[in-house]
């Protein structure tokens, strides 16, 4: 809900509780709206993920009102590769009808498998709230092909627990940083990519949790770590095997879980 407040400017100014949708962190935020115009996006400390906003979130007004922002469907009228694409504004109905017609034609002539759907990374873009719908559309259409990119830290952060436990952490589940006694970040810098994890980690360290960071650079939370392991690029596997050797040698693992 929004509350009207006077901030020393003429006109009506409201503070609106919201969240930033520009990445999967979905940080809680407070939007300042003046005369119907978004003028600022700031943290919302009373929200679980609103203790801080990154520069991308703070730049929300610039993104919303940027002169190059596309606000309507555009149709190319010149061939691909032409110096001027000849963009022409069309209605949403025409855009949706054109896309539907081309997709159904491709499916009829070559099968739905000939179409690949593409998406930006849900971790670092506004696709975090839309990727499930793209997946449903792709499946309903009948295509098995989905192309997407993933940031460097996402491969380990998302895929390693998926292959180990069956679900991504963080992803489908959020790590219990508030209760953790030891936190290990390996090639992951939440100060840049997920501020909610960074602020929760700082709070955990303040209450006594131990922090270990594996990163060639002393970036982000590495500067606050109790142990910063400065691996040479490309030697992560060596460190992982060394840790595995010590765990086996000392018996620091559950045999039943390891065998399973």
Image (cartoon, grey):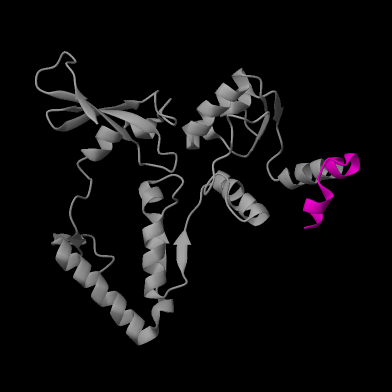
The x and y percentages for residue 8 are 16, 13
Left or right: where 209 falls relative to 81? right
Q: Residue reaching furthest right?
A: 249
Residue 138 position by quadrant: bottom left
Q: Is residue 212 visible?
A: no
Q: Residue reaching furthest top?
A: 8
The x and y percentages for residue 31 are 27, 29
The range drawn in magenta is 246-260
The x and y percentages for residue 218 are 62, 28
- Of residue 254 and residue 185, the one placed in the foreground of this image is 254
Residue appearing at x 26%, y 34% in the figure: 62
Q: Split into 4 quadrants, where in the image is the C terminus?
A: bottom right
Q: Residue reaching furthest left?
A: 11
- Of residue 160 and residue 239, the one placed in the foreground of this image is 160
Left or right: where 158 falls relative to 225? left
Q: Residue reaching furthest bottom?
A: 109
Residue 213 position by quadrant: top right
Residue appearing at x 33%, y 85% in the figure: 108
16 inside magenta stretch? no
Q: Split into 4 quadrants, where in the image is the N terminus?
A: top left
How many labels were placed on the picture?
A: 0
């Amino acid at each position: 809900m929004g509350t009207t407040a006077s901030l020393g400017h003429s006109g009506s100014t409201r503070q609106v509780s919201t969240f930033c949708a520009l990445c999967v962190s979905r940080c809680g935020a407070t939007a300042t709206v003046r005369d119907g115009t978004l003028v600022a996006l700031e943290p919302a400390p009373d929200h679980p993920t609103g203790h801080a906003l990154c520069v991308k979130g703070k730049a929300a007004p610039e993104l919303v009102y940027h002169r190059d922002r596309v606000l309507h469907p555009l149709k190319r009228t010149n061939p691909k590769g032409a110096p001027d694409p000849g963009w022409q504004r069309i209605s949403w109905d025409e855009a949706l009808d054109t896309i539907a017609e081309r997709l159904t034609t491709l499916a009829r002539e070559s099968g739905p498998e000939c179409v690949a759907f593409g998406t930006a990374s849900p971790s670092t873009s506004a696709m975090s709230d839309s990727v499930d719908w793209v997946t449903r559309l792709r499946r309903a259409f009948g295509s098995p092909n989905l192309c997407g990119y993933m940031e460097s830290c996402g491969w380990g952060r998302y895929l390693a627990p998926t292959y180990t436990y069956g679900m991504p952490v963080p992803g489908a589940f959020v790590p219990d940083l508030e209760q953790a006694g030891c936190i290990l970040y390996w090639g992951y810098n939440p100060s840049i990519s997920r501020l909610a994890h960074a602020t929760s980690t700082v709070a955990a360290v303040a209450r006594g949790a131990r922090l270990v960071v594996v990163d060639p650079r002393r970036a982000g939370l590495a500067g606050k770590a109790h142990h910063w392991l400065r691996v040479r690029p490309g030697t992560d596997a060596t460190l992982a095997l060394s840790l595995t050797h010590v765990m086996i040698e000392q018996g620091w693992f559950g045999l039943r879980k390891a065998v399973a």
